[in-house]
């Protein structure tokens, strides 16, 4: 089963015949293919431009930092001692 969206097509994983069918359908329907390409490009430009990605960096760093702190606390508690944040005892 192929599902054609406004900006792409979805086919089940591991089904090359479905992928081929979707590609052939798009080959036959040039207006739809061109419209999907334009909408897909606009979507990528809107979601993945430099300023959008740069705005996400603080959240990514904060999540990594929080995960690291949780990991250090968990490791030090499971060792029965207080950690210094560097993997050793305080």
Image (spheres, rainbow, N blue to C red):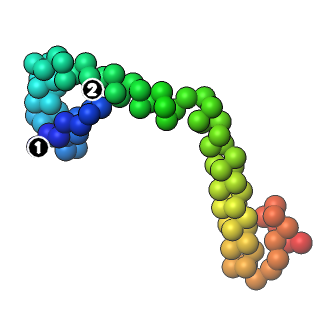
Residue sitting at x 18%, y 18%: 31
**Vertical side of 3 occupied by 33: above or below:** above
Mark identifier at residue 22 = none
From where the camera sits, is residue 20 visible?
A: no
Residue 28 drawn at (x, y percent): 10, 18
* Alpha carbon distance from label 1 to label 2: 19 Å
**Vertical side of 39 occupied by 54: above or below:** below
Callout 2: SS: helix
Q: Residue furthest right?
A: 90
Mark identifier at residue 36 = 2
Residue 13 drawn at (x, y percent): 22, 44
Q: Nearer the viewer, residue 13 or 27?
A: 27
Residue highlighted by disc 1:
1
Depth-wise, is mark 1 or mark 2 nearer the camera? 2
Judge left or right: residue 71 versus residue 84. left
Badge 2 density bin: few <14, some 14–19, many ≥20, Cα 10 Å: some
Residue sitting at x 41%, y 26%: 42
Image quarter of residue 76? bottom right
* On-image quarter of the N terminus: top left
Residue sitting at x 66%, y 61%: 67
From where the camera sits, is residue 9 visible?
A: yes
Mark 1 or 2, nearer chain start: 1
**Vertical side of 17 occupied by 62: above or below:** below
Residue sitting at x 49%, y 31%: 46
Image quarter of residue 70? bottom right
Tags 1 and 2 touching, CB below 8 Å: no
Callout 1: SS: loop
Judge left or right: residue 81 versus residue 31. right
**Vertical side of 40 occupied by 66: above or below:** below
Q: Residue furthest bottom?
A: 80
């Amino acid at each position: 089963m192929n599902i054609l969206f406004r900006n792409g097509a979805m086919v089940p994983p591991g089904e090359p015949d479905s992928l081929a069918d979707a590609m052939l359908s798009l080959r036959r329907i040039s207006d739809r293919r061109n419209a999907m390409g334009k909408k897909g490009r606009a979507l990528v430009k809107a979601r993945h431009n430099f300023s959008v990605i740069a705005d996400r960096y603080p959240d990514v760093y904060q999540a990594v930092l929080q995960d690291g702190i949780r990991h250090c606390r968990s490791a030090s508690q499971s060792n029965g001692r207080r950690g210094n944040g560097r993997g050793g005892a305080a």
